[in-house]
Amino acid sequence: MISLHEVFERGTDAVKSAVLAFGARHLPDAVGLNTEPDWKQAEKHFTQLIEVIMGSAATRQPGVAATVRRAENEAIGLLLAFNTVPNYRCPICIKS
Ligand SMILES: [Zn+2]
């Protein structure tokens, strides 16, 4: 499955900025000067987002690679859509 980092590396400028915005939704809880995004958390939530899109049954069906690719593309599309909403929250963060 594609990682958030790979999405950033391969993405257009719009995708890169969407990835950065998604990362920025994952600031560590600690109050202080550390405002670097928690990328580990962001990566995990991006993967979970892809899994939600795929649905749990999808991985048991033939043509898994194509299904995964389609879900990855949809997840990237979602990041782009999120990025048009000011102060959006990561849907996985809200769920957990
Ligand atoms: Zn999240």
Image (tube, rainbow, N blue to C red):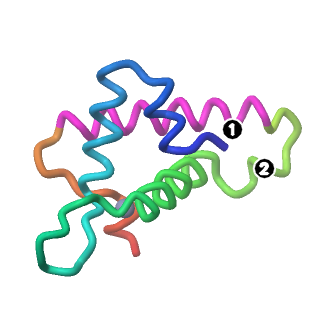
* Residue in the image at 12% along x and 70% along y: 33
Point out the tag, 1 or 2, that comes first from the N-terminus: 2
- Left or right of 42? Residue 36 is left
- Residue designated by label 1: 68
x and y, in percent, of residue 13 in the image: 31, 20
- The local secondary structure at tag 2 comes to helix
Please identify the quarter of the rendering in which residue 90 is found.
bottom left
In this view, 30 is above or below 34: below
- Using a 10 Å C-alpha cutoff, classify the residue at mark 1 as few (fewer than 14 neighbours), some (14 to 19) or many (20 or more): some
x and y, in percent, of residue 81 in the image: 29, 34
- Residue designated by label 2: 59
Q: Residue furthest bottom?
A: 30
Distance CA(mark 1)–CA(mark 2): 8 Å
- Left or right of 11? Residue 6 is right
Which region is colored magenta? Answer: 65-84
* Residue in the image at 32% along x and 51% along y: 23
The residue closer to the viewer here, 85 or 35, is 35
